[in-house]
Image (cartoon, rainbow, N blue to C red):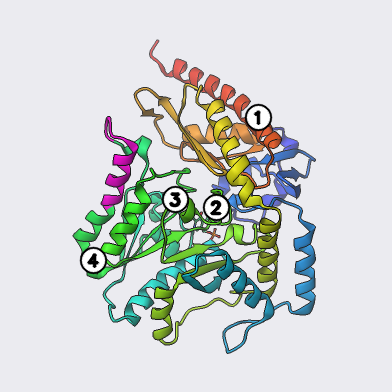
Amino acid sequence: MSKKHHSHEAMRHHLHPFSDNAQLQKEGVRVIVKAKGVYIYDENKQKILDAMAGLWCVNIGYGRRKLAKVAKKQMEKLPFYNTFFKTTHPAVIKLSKKLIDITPPQFNYVFYTNSGSESVDTMMRMVRHYWTSVGQPDKKVIIGRWNGYHGSTIGAASIGGMKSMHTQGGLPISNIVHIEQPWYYGLARANETEEAFGLRAANWLEEKILSIGADKIAAFVGEPIQGAGGVIIPPETYWPRIQEICQKYDILLVSDEVICGYGRTGQWFGYQALGFEPDIFTMAKGLSSGYLPIGAVLVNDKVAAGLLAGGEFNHGFTYGGHPVSAAVARANLSILDKEHIIQRVHDQTGPYLQKRWAETFKPFKYVADVRSLGLMCGFTLVKNKHTKTLWPNWGEAGLICRDLFFKHNLIMRACGDHIVAAPPLIITPDEIEQMLAIARQCMIEFETIMDQRQTSASPA
Ligand SMILES: Cc1ncc(COP(=O)(O)O)c(C=O)c1O
């Protein structure tokens, strides 16, 4: 990328998240100044196709004036009030009603936060409070999965299974354990069917429960499809078996819908697409399409009854249920509804992307496990797809590839050596073609680079 696309000035005072800031200081960053539809624009007027919907969140696309108008009106009328002390306000009342309307009948209560991490931390405190309320205070252990991502607060990073996060600062906190992720390509035995692997992977939960004791376990938490773990789509047998195990041992089942919620999989929520019913689900991102920070935790009637019986829940955030965020979230949900955006992902753009994603990437020799559901897709960069040999230094090939996309004005992401995309849900088939055409060129360049590396690495 030419130097004029970099801004060093922008870097001077800002420590960027999930970044090597010393390296950024040398390289500079790109300054994004505006956005419309599926495109973002930098200060040098470069038009960039954002196939990650920001951070998996701008579901209705950029540049919706309606949301700006709603925010302005709400800000002028009631810019802030809290819901702590026997008070509430119309924006949060209306949003709650809308959330209850779009979810199955057993979900009737919602707790508000400002982010996915706060939703997950809230859920962690909530499930422990629930078990104490119903007379089982020893049920404290929460089970997550390796490579799951649930956020960056101490609780959320602990229940997440990102080892690179755990090694910084001595995580996880106590009473958190993990099981392996349901990644068929990476973890199946020779000749094992997807169905059989799905059941075996779910049974890792039962093994963990039995090794600890069900009377100690509060909840199991998973993303229907692991997002930041690399768009890991479990076999169809996986989630129904997980649900069965949770019911058998009286363990709360939590679906982290921060990415999968609000249409990403072609259904309102990921658990609907993956065939299970959680007791609790956490959300953020697509709830407001990222226009303002807001998150929420929905609980079913069983959990609500326990919480209502448990007296005061000593938990809450100043900005939880913020009136402006709540009004904007509700307007976002109306747009999803009125424009039939989720239906379109389900019937049209999801299947279209699935087909074209596979056709585009399967032929590449360093690409394996090409996968997709709704508007969430991925593949894995491998050294040899016949022997399933990964590249040495997991993540290095991914970064080379990601930087090529970026150089060619396409945002896709590397999660280790998994390459993923999750475009705004309003993307059209033409825009999908543009995205794939750029990505294909980048993959040709990527394979040339990797071929050269192999040649120069092989003994003379
Ligand atoms: C599944 C999942 N849960 C939680 C989070 C944390 O959300 P936030 O970054 O809003 O705190 C994320 C963020 O990517 C996520 O993907």
In this view, the mark in front (3 or 1): 3
Residue under numbered circle 2:
267
Question: Badge 2, how many Cα within 10 Å: few under 14, some, many 20+?
Answer: many
* Disc 4 to disc 3, C-alpha distance: 25 Å
Please name the residue shown 55% across and 76% down the image: 317
Residue under numbered circle 3:
274
**Do the residues under discs 4 and 2 have CB atoms within 8 angstroms?**
no
- Which residue range is magenta in the image? 189-204
Q: Locate residue 153, reporting x and y percent.
A: 48, 63
Dot 4: element: helix
* Disc 4 to disc 2, C-alpha distance: 32 Å
Q: Quadrant of residue 410?
A: top right
Q: In which quadrant of the rendered image does the C terminus lie?
A: top left
Q: Earlier in the sequence, mark 4 or mark 3?
A: 4
Above or below, 134 relative to 182 = below
Q: Quadrant of residue 38?
A: top right
Above or below, 114 relative to 206 = below
Q: Earlier in the sequence, mark 1 or mark 2?
A: 2
Q: Amino acid at mark 1?
A: Ile
Q: Earlier in the sequence, mark 4 or mark 2?
A: 4
Q: Please name the predominant secondary structure of the magenta segment in the image.
A: helix
Tag of residue 206: none
Tag of residue 438: 1
Tag of residue 214: 4
* Disc 1 to disc 4, C-alpha distance: 50 Å
Report whether the residue tagged 4 is closer than 8 Å to ligand 1. Answer: no
Dot 2: element: loop
* Disc 3 to disc 1, C-alpha distance: 31 Å
In this view, the mark in front (4 or 2): 2
